[in-house]
Amino acid sequence: MDGISSTDLVVAGISLTAPPADFAPKVDKEKIAASSAVRSSSAKPGLPIKQMVLAHVTGAALVPPIDRVLWVVSFDVEGLRVPSLGPAGAPEDFPYVYSLVLVDPDTGSVVYSDWAAGLPQN
């Protein structure tokens, strides 16, 4: 998936597989993309969407656990940084690695959102 590596998905406890061939979402991709609830659930509100796919999402370690078909939305976090809260001498900030939102395909409601930031590259 563009915007989040398979390794980052594994670390986040999320697995994506193809949805059933006959699955038909009640809320289409365009409505999800236009949703202010989806956009405000990203790491920073208003980020551009990088990719959106319909997938069977499994996340047994998530709270609550997820095992269903959802819209998976990744956001473009290129160049964004999160401030460090570390002690004196710690790096000032860290680059975002990904921002991901999972959306119910029947209601358009946000089911789960997650983001991660990594250590600066030297």
Image (cartoon, helix red, strand yellow):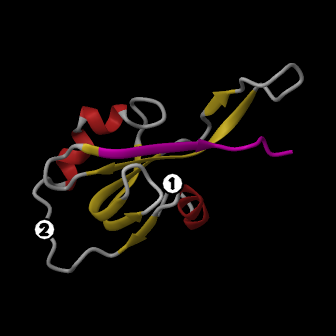
> Residue 8 vs residue 19: left or right?
right
Where residue 48 appears, as percent x and y from the top left, is: 41, 40
Where residue 104 appears, as percent x and y from the top left, is: 22, 52
Element under disc 1: loop
Query: What residue occupies the far top of the structure in this picture?
Result: 88
Kindly report which numbered mark, 2 or 1, lies closer to the viewer in this rendering.
2
The residue that mark 1 highlights is: 3
Q: Quadrant of the C terminus?
A: top right
Residue closer to the observer: 50 or 112: 112
Q: How many marks?
A: 2
Q: Is residue 91 magenta?
A: no
> Residue 46 vs residue 106: left or right?
right
Residue that appears at 51% across and 54% down: 3
- Would you place residue 119 above or below residue 28 in this image? above
Residue closer to the observer: 30 or 17: 17
- Would you place residue 43 above or below residue 20 in this image? above
> Residue 122 vs residue 93: left or right?
right
Where residue 114 appears, as percent x and y from the top left, is: 47, 44
Residue that appears at 13% across and 68% down: 24
Residue that appears at 35% across and 31% down: 40
Callout 1 amino acid: Gly
Q: Residues within 10 Å of mark 1 (few under 14, many from 20)?
A: some
Alpha carbons under labels 2 and 1: distance apart:
25 Å
Residue range in magenta is 111-122
> Residue 116 vs residue 46: left or right?
right
